Amino acid sequence: MGLLVLLGFFMARKGWLSSDTLSDLTRILIDVVIPCTFILAMARSFTFEFFRQGFVPALVAAGWIVASWGLGALWFRLFPGDSVNRDRSVTAMMMISNSIYLPLPVILAVVPEPMHDTATMYISIVALPSILIMWTAGVALLSGSAGPSPGERLKMVFNAPILSVVAGILLTLIPGVREAALSEPGSFFPAKMLFSGMGYLSRILSPLAMLILGGLIASGAGNRRVPLKYVVPLIGVRLLLIPAVVYGLIRSGLLELPSLASTALILVAAAPPATNHALIARRYHGEWALVSALQLITHVVALATLPLWLSVGLGL
């Protein structure tokens, strides 16, 4: 996976992956590949008992978002930055991690294939609070004077990953869907073909995500000299404090979760800020240059910290 990140970085620096191409590939990943992965995983393995078990990890994810919001507000009240908008943007980056785009391909790369569907469902459930808050409070914090209208915010909440989780759950209520998703003999052939196509698309998730990540890191390489008063709290909270607290809760026994759920939770907790932060800031005239520069720094640091937290998570 590291080699794929380096390949994406090299291709972007050579101009083989332009910013427009990266935007299109990101849109394909978020709007097509990830939804196919979610729908297929839900159709194959979802049960309402599993959803009930996933409530605790989702609640923990919501808790660290609220706690990070409070920490960011307190930090910039005690140590104010260059402007209120910049402080709010960094606070948003503390709150919301790259909850799907990076943790999902990582966990699929390290667990056995028979566990892929279960791992995908755990990641999707843990990511729900991040997605919902990203496109509501996150947009408000990242926007400049011209933020989105209430109608635009509503459309943002109902995005492709969220809708695909709901669609996958609803499909499990239809007789014969699970059999078709599992390609069992005698299942409804058109449905089996559709799920087979989703399976092929889902297999490109990991390599495509890593190539895009490398390209995004290269695209931000021109942004330098970010004030330490933004870098230090962001790395400290997003990449170190939050995963450490989650690990402590699991290790102490306060959170009794299956091993795979613990790994998924730590991966999402340890992920760098969501790549959509920079896109939102640019779309709504926020501090997109600062956000892009911080994205580069945190993703480079995460290349070292994420494997460490992953090894911790796999040991639980």
Image (cartoon, helix red, strand yellow):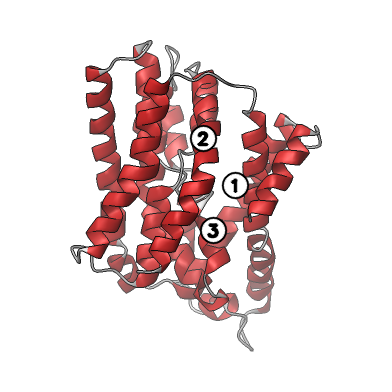
Distance between the alpha carbons at the discs numbered 2 and 1: 13 Å
Instruction: Say which residue appears at 46% left-offset and 74% top-offset.
Output: 45
Of callouts 1 and 3, the N-terminal one? 1
Q: Is residue 278 above or below residue 123?
A: above
Say what amino acid the circle numbered 1 marks: Asp
Q: Position of residue 214 (x, y in %)?
A: 65, 42
Q: Looking at the picture, how far across and down is residue 239, in whole percent?
A: 40, 43
Quarter of the figure that contains the N terminus: bottom right
Question: Does residue 311 show up?
Answer: yes
Look at mark 2 in the image and give the residue it sits on: 276
Decide which of 8, 204 is in the foreground and name it: 8
Badge 3 crowding class, 10 Å Cα cut-off, few under 14, some 14 to 19, many 20 or more, is many
- Residue visible at 24% across and 39% down in the picture: 67
Which residue is depicted at the point 57% across and 20% down?
224
Residue 163 showing in the rendered view: no
First reached walking from the N terminus: tag 2 or tag 1: 1
Left or right, 287 with respect to 6, comes to left
Residue 9's place in the image compared with 282, above or below, is below
Q: CA distance from mark 3 to mark 2?
A: 19 Å
Q: Position of residue 183 (x, y in %)?
A: 62, 81
Q: Amino acid at mark 2?
A: Asn
Residue tagged by mark 3?
106
- Disc 3 element: helix
- Amino acid on which disc 3 is placed: Val
* Front disc: 1 or 3: 3
